[in-house]
Image: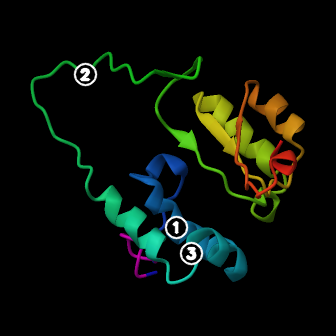
Amino acid sequence: MTWAPRDVNYLIASPKGAINVFDFEPVMFQKVPPAHFGYMASGIDDEVTLRANREGFLKFQLRPRRLVDVSKVDMTMELFGQKYNSPIMLAPTGGHRAYHPDGEIATAKGAKAGNHGMILSTQTSTVVEDVIKARGAPVWMQLYATNKFDVAR
């Protein structure tokens, strides 16, 4: 995993041990079938977009501040009339049941627990209405549009 910032032999013991989302990749590499890992962790063509995304993350750095009161940090945000605890959104990925028997329902419950926004993939393996029910709030839906607006509608 030359693109992962951590050693493939380093596995976090629980999600609480993750410093960033990339800490989950070595665990996934060890725990899921190779085809599933390849689908989730790779990009299309020459992985140009994947590389650009990862390099883009390097542009954002935390700026340490000292002697600043951080006892009451408020990361809440409002987007299109929905209030979330933070700007974290769960991006659309298809076929969650390939990774967990509860599929997108488990993902929706996780989004609900943290009050994070969720974008459901066009390739969902769970009925949209069931995901919304599990999330307890509206979810966004990814749309692979065609050249026919009636199909998209």
- Specify start and end residues of the magenta stretch as a single range: 2-8
| Element carrying mark 2 | loop
- Render colour scheme: rainbow
Residue 65's place in the image compared with 22, above or below, is: above
Residue 79's place in the image compared with 94, above or below, is: above
Q: Which mark is residue 25?
A: 1
Q: Earlier in the sequence, mark 2 or mark 3?
A: 3
Residue bearing mark 3: 42
Q: Quadrant of the C terminus?
A: top right
Image quadrant where residue 146 sits: bottom right
- What residue is drawn where x is 46% and y is 33%? 87
Residue bearing mark 2: 70
24 horizontally vs 40: left or right: left
Question: Residue 62 location, x and y as percent?
Answer: 23, 44
Mark yes or no: residue 75 visible: yes
100 horizontally vs 113: left or right: right
Q: Are marks 3 and 1 in contact (CB under 8 Å)?
A: no
- What residue is drawn where x is 74% and y is 59%? 94
Main secondary-structure element of the magenta-colored stretch = loop
- What residue is drawn where x is 66% and y is 73%? 39
